[in-house]
Structure formats: C-alpha cells, structure tokens
Image (cartoon, rainbow, N blue to C red):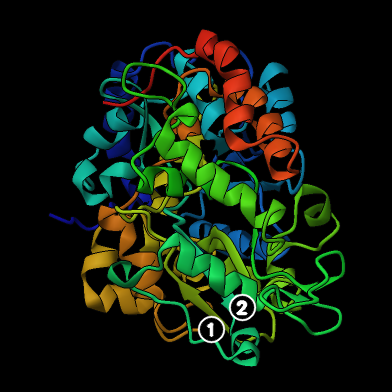
Amino acid sequence: MFRKKLEVQNETVGKYKVFISILMCLTLSVFVYAGGGSEKSASQDTVVLNFTYWGGPYEKPTIENMIASFEAKYPHIKVQGQHIPADYEAKMSAMVAGNQAPDLGYIRDWMALDYAKENMLYNIFDLIDADSSIQRDDFIEDLFLYWDKGKSYGMFTAAESYGLFYNKQAFRDAGIPDLPTTMESALTWDQFVEITKKLTIDRNGKNATEPGFDRTRIRQYGLRFDFNQGAYMPLVRSNGGDYVTDDNKFGLTQPAALKVLQNMADLTVKHGVAPAPAEASALPSAAVSLINKQAAIIMIGQWVLLDLAQGSADFGVGVLPNYGTYVTSPGWGTIGIFKTTKHPEEAYLFWKWITDPANSLETHKAGLWMPMMKKYYTDNSLVSLWARGNKAHPEGYTDAIMLPVLNNLKTHPSSYVMNFPKIDALVQPALERMYLGQETAEQAMKKIEPEVNKLIQGKYIW
C-alpha cells in the first residue's frame, strides 16, 4: 500500500512535463492571478521557490536543515525559506493582498479555507491522484482538510497531537506518581483536578489542598493551558459535544460543552491551580514555564517537545483527562500551494518532500513534527526512527501522544466550521470573561448565542 517516493533528477524532468500537463488540466485557472511568489535565477536553469513558515527560535534551524537536504537532492531547485515568527496571519494576508503570495507555505486553516474557496490554492487531491508514487491512503485520513466534497487544500503541517507534558521533579517533590500514558488509564476530570491542587505551591510552600494556602502568591501552578480551542475542544469532544451541532446551532451552549467549559473555568476561578489570562501573559512560554517549575503540567500540542528537549528539566508525557471517549486534536495550520506559483511542478515536489518523514526525520526526532503517513505509526521499525531513543520523546510517548492520532483524532473547529473567524471573535472574549470569573460558562456562552447562530453557515465535513 505504501509506495516508494518518486525521485526526480534533472535528467528525468522530461517525464514531469507529462505530469504538469495533467496537473494543469485537473486544475483550472492555474495562472489566472498575476505575479506570484517564485522566480527564475539568472541562469534560467535553477528554479527558486519561496516558502513561508512560522515557529520559535529552535524551529527555524530545523526547517532550514530540511530545506538544505531537499536542495542537496534536487540542486536545480532553490528554496528561499522565510521565517515569520510573529504576526504571521497579518503578514500572510498582506502578501496575498499585494499579489506576493509565496509558492507554498504554512497557512492557518481558517485562512486557507477562504483562499481555497477563492480558487487560490491547489486541490491537493488532484495532485496526489495524478502522481503514481503516492496515494491518499498513505496518509492519515483525518489530517486532510476540505473546502468542498472531494476538494482538499492540504493536510496539517504535521499531526501534532495534544496531550499533557509535566516536570517530573515537581511530581517527585509532591510525592505524586507519574501521569498515566495510555488512553485506557486516563484520569477522570476530578482525579486530574486533585493532582493539580497538590502541585500548586504558594511562596510559603503550601499546596492548594492545605489550610493557609495563599493563591495570590503562587510559586508553581499545577497546570498551565491556552485559552483557545486547542485546550477546550478535545475535552468538549471527549464529553460528546461540538462547536457547532449537527443541526447547525451553537454547540458551546449545549450541556456537554458547558460542563467542560465550567470545569476549566474552575481551574482559574475556584481552585486557583492555573493562571488566568492576565497571570499567564506575565509568564514565559509554556515550555520555559515547565522547565523552570513555574507550571508543573502544561496542556498543549506535542510540538512543545522541541523546546523542552533543549532544556535540562526531566519531563514526562501523559494522556489528556477523559470524559468518556478519549479525544486528542492536531494543531491548526496547513501547508498550501498557491496557484500563483510559476513553478507548480517544483512546488508540489517540495510539498511531497515535506510530507514524507523519510526526508525530514530530524524535524520529527527533534520533537517538532509528527508524521502524516500511517506506516510511521504502525511499522515498529519506522516508529523507532523518530519516536523512541531520543531526548524529545520520553518513555510513554508512543502510547500517550502517538497512538491516539490513529483512531482518536478530532480536528479543531477552525478547520471545519464555516465562518469560524467571525464566530471565534465572539467566543474568545466570552471565554476570557469566564476564566476571569466575571460570568459562568453558561452565562458567557448564552449571552453570545443569538449572534453566533446568525453567523453559523455549516461545517466542511465530507
């Protein structure tokens, strides 16, 4: 089922002329947009591709090394990697509006949905189906992102499963055993909260279960999590809820979702075991917070392993709490190929290179990415190439983080809810009021429900 990647050398460019002819027939209006992100070098023999990506300081050299390996294999193609560490969405929007879109690059899924609907991105299914070296079934099905039936603008940048990451020394100091690493042994929410209480320490050394605990002077939080869809949606899905219901109503006002949201609000408001938005903004990054024991546990995507592996902390991994059906989620970005590219053949070749872990094992071993190809989860010899025997993947990783991707992955609403940005613009302020204790989860969500329902247009699920 899994076929060897197509290797294209300079002398075989001729057969790619046949491929590009097929590609152009399958995708209309390839060059209807003026401009484009790529250019020919002065020699006219070297193709130059512009590739944009986000990420922290440790991610940049990892991506640069991957680009270098691609260029070594295909010396007639040069990839100009543009690292945009901040304000990526605004800068990408400006590039597209100015007719300076890259040949291919990272794109937030909600942005990519709009670009795809406007016929600005290639349907990746057309490209895969015209390529005999790979097939759709090589990849994990839930990682494809759709804008219409049979039309996908790509996959996630990587699988990037969410989980729990914790400082083992903080656990030892509190006399708490390691977190469970199998879905079957996942903690209930109440069990999880009790652990975070024992790990939340004030400046006098008292934890949140002890008399005299001072929640205004926290030295170590038991938990840190983001206040966006990444943290709450896997748990909402675990409890049987969704962002938008099947009959196109606001899902976060339903009992299954409200229970989860209130439980999360209680972490900051009632129990004081997690920083509220204002306190969190004063802390360093999630990884640094864990390394420095400012947070004993962080709930985040597995890409944090890249940063954790750079530190000296003894860290572990665990499965998320479970409300009934275990669920994890990937990140919310894709790698899209813009139709304004003057070199779709080479852009697709680089896209294939990125999506094949054999070509970018460093990015996987370093903890930045998870493979999108199934065989890197099911073939033990391939699993060992990236998920075992290195600092970024501690004991328990394959059970806690890797295996849930195959059968328990549910994508975030930003990748399937129509009109998500406008809806989220109402949801996020409501969530902040909830985390600050200004409103209960029910009050916050019910208040915005009438306006949200006006914006709901359906879901991109086929």
Residue 347: % across, % down:
47, 38
User: Residues at badges 1 and 2 in contact (C-beta under 8 Å)?
Assistant: yes
Residue 361: % across, % down:
44, 69
Camera-side residue: 387 or 347?
387
Give the class, few, some or many, for how many residues have Cα within 10 Å of label 1's Cα (few <14, many ≥20): some
Q: Quadrant of residue 297?
A: bottom right
Q: Amino acid at mark 1?
A: Lys
Q: Is residue 385 above or below residue 48?
A: below
Query: Which residue in the protein does label 1 denote?
Result: 391
Q: Quadrant of residue 251?
A: top left
Residue at image location 42% in from the left, 34% down from the top? 255
Query: Which residue in the protein does label 2 denote?
Result: 309
- Secondary structure beneath label 1: loop
Residue at image location 57% in from the left, 22% down from the top? 446
Residue 299: % across, % down:
57, 61
Camera-side residue: 231 or 385?
231
Which numbered disc flags the more N-terminal residue, 1 or 2?
Answer: 2
Q: Is residue 346 above or below residue 265?
A: above
Give left or right: position of 445 versus 435.
left
On-image quarter of the N terminus? bottom left
Give the class, few, some or many, for how many residues have Cα within 10 Å of label 2's Cα (few <14, many ≥20): many
- Secondary structure beneath label 2: loop
Give left or right: position of 68 versus 142.
right
Residue 398 visible in this rendered orientation of the protein: yes
On-image quarter of the C terminus? top left
Give left or right: position of 26 versus 33.
left
Q: Residue furthest front?
A: 211
Q: What label does residue 193 carry, if any?
A: none
Q: Quadrant of residue 147?
A: top left
